[in-house]
Image: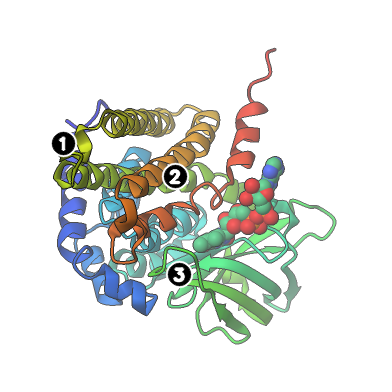
Amino acid sequence: MRNAYMTDELEAIYDQTVEFVTNEVLPHGAGWEEAGKVPRDVLHRMGALGMFGLRVPEEHGGLGLGMLASATFSEALGASTFAGFDVTVLVHTDMAGPHLLNSGSPEQHAEWVPKMLSGEAILSIGVSEPDAGSDVAGIRSSAVKDGDGWRINGRKMFITNAVYGDLTIVAARTDPDNKYGITMFLVPAGTEGFEVATKLNKHGWLCSDTAELVLDDVWVPDDHVLGTVHRGFYETMKNFQNERMVLVGMGLGAAQAAIDMTNAYTQERQAFGGHLFDLGAIRQRMAMNQAKIDAVRASMYHAAWMHDAGQDNVKAMSGVKAWGCEVVNQVMYDCVQFHGGMGYMRESAIERMYRDARILPIGGGATEVMLEEVAKRSYVQ
Ligand SMILES: Cc1cc2nc3c(=O)[nH]c(=O)nc-3n(C[C@H](O)[C@H](O)[C@H](O)COP(=O)(O)OP(=O)(O)OC[C@H]3O[C@@H](n4cnc5c(N)ncnc54)[C@H](O)[C@@H]3O)c2cc1C
């Protein structure tokens, strides 16, 4: 077993996912980075293999597994070394998907969950805005009641999967007198007034599509309200621990791949009458990196286990999001360093992985915001 929290089923998920990314992503990812998108047929194949249904309840055709399954899946995806691919998948399954699963009505489930499982519909989650990211309660997009539906106006920023995706779950303010008076809406691509303003050009995650969206008098019927009117802020918060965790998980998987490839490279590379890896400074730094990544892994799985055991894991998961993502970046830095000039070349995987990792301490809860979550739970009574 890979760790104390594994079961035979989770081991099988890990192995299947690593096999998939090794055969279907690694050989093609460079082309996807150039194209700025992950081909839909790859996502369809993942759907056909059941990979989008780990968290989907059995009555809807999924496996109905808990957070440990998402931990396992996200870590295994990280072995792809193409984090843009990993995040494309994880936004669908673990960042947008949970909103639909947790808050959707039976009719919404019947319409969208089968398409989500197969990859026919790729999901995105639209919370961040040009003027509100960390401060979710500061969003300005608004929705007002209009007949038997709602009219939505506003802008959304940095929305993953929203250029080529099919359904965006949009957060909009519905109670102007209450800063937490937010409602979530299902907004299908192609809805009149719902447009991609810009396909954003990024530092990393190049094969992940990221949109700035405009909602210009978008009208959706009442049955597109996801969950309870005015309660979207609280419903969204419930999904945050999972979102945080899969970002750590994909970073962890990538960092392990980076360590493995750097150890292999330095054991091959000749210098000073031996191999680079035989130099104490290098072998010891890489050993420390391995120890740190092992500690992140243990903490992440433990925080996931807490959730599955019915315990509050906000402090634990926020903590591991904060330091785990920083550790992943430190590891990537060292791995570039020990690849020397080659690590700075666009042709080397580690150059891409280094760029890809930089967003992890910013997105899905910046390090400082995570540390506040830990700190406010650290007052001694
Ligand atoms: C590639 C990419 C993909 C994304 N995908 C999505 C998506 O699919 N859906 C979505 O809704 N959003 C998405 N985001 C948005 C992302 O979650 C936000 O960028 C993130 O929450 C930070 O918000 P911000 O960029 O507005 O930074 P700000 O909120 O302006 O913060 C800037 C910086 O200030 C610091 N800071 C912020 N708050 C505090 C605080 N309380 N205390 C101390 N320091 C603080 C942090 O260092 C932070 O990085 C994505 C972003 C990127 C770059």
From the viewer's perspective, tell me whether residue 344 is left or right of residue 173: left
Disc marking residue 161: 3
Q: Earlier in the sequence, mark 2 or mark 3?
A: 3
Identity, as a three-letter code, of the amino acid under mark 3: Asn
Q: Could you say which quadrant of the image residue 216 lies in?
A: bottom right
- Residue 25 image position (x, y, % from top left): 23, 64
Q: Could you say which quadrant of the image residue 165 lies in?
A: bottom left
* Quadrant of ligand 1 in image: bottom right
Q: Earlier in the sequence, mark 1 or mark 3?
A: 1
| Mark 2 vs mark 1: in front | 2
For mark 3, give the secondary structure.
Answer: loop
| Mark 2 vs mark 3: in front | 2
Counting labels gives 3
For mark 1, give the secondary structure.
Answer: helix
Residue nearer the viewer, 130 or 177 = 130
Residue 198 in view here? yes
Q: Quadrant of the C terminus?
A: top right
How far is mark 1 from mark 3, CA to CA? 32 Å
Disc marking residue 145: none
Which residue is tagged 1? 8
Residue appearing at x 43%, y 33% in the figure: 307
Identity, as a three-letter code, of the amino acid under mark 1: Asp
The verdict on label 3 being within 8 Å of ligand 1 is yes
